[in-house]
Image (spheres, rainbow, N blue to C red):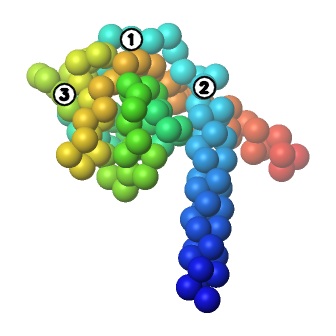
Amino acid sequence: MKALIAMFALLLVTNASAQTVEKQDKALNEYLPYAGEPVDRFQFWDLKRWELVGDYKVVVWARLNEPYLLTVDRPCDDLRWAKEIGVTSTANSVRNRFDAVVIGKRRCRINEIRPIDYKKYLADRKAGKEADNS
């Protein structure tokens, strides 16, 4: 009986994980067309919001309408299960290959920063919804 319960629990965890991966892939595919060329740094005062979009990718909002797609070095296994993250910075600047995404006590070095054209992203989503309602 214990084995059956354990298998059921494993199935639930696997299923939840698969749904999460699908959601992350969908979000990444939505953001990628709006991601600009890699930059070396961005201004950062406070982490307003974040969204996990892959095992090694996270979108962070430095300001309400200013997101960046960050890719971290492998391995960074803790990122996939993170409930909270932080981002290191020096003199209010996050720098590629110097700063990190922090999960608990683990630091995952940022190896790519790409700004996202969030105004265009939102405008295109709005236009798509209006087209769907027509």
Residue 80, percent across and down?
A: 45, 46
The residue depicted at 66 percent of the width and 41 percent of the height is 26
Task: Name the quarter where the N terminus is drawn.
Answer: bottom right
The residue depicted at 43 percent of the width and 52 percent of the height is 81
Amino acid type of the residue that numbered disc 3 sits on in the rendered structure? Ser
Mark 2 and 1 residues: CB-CB less than 8 Å, in contact?
A: no
- Hey, which quadrant is residue 114 in on the image? top left
N-terminal label among 2 and 1? 2
Q: CA distance from mark 2 to mark 1?
A: 15 Å
Q: Which residue is mark 2?
A: 32
**Local secondary structure at mark 3:** loop
Amino acid type of the residue that numbered disc 2 sits on in the rendered structure? Leu
Q: CA distance from mark 3 to mark 2?
A: 24 Å
N-terminal label among 1 and 3? 1
N-terminal label among 3 and 2? 2
**Local secondary structure at mark 2:** helix
The residue depicted at 52 percent of the width and 15 percent of the height is 36
The residue depicted at 75 percent of the width and 45 percent of the height is 129
Q: Does residue 67 appear in this view?
A: no
Which numbered disc covers residue 89? Answer: 3
In the drawing, does residue 131 fall left or right of residue 50? right
**95 shown above or below 77:** above
Q: Does residue 19 appear in this view?
A: yes
**Local secondary structure at mark 1:** loop
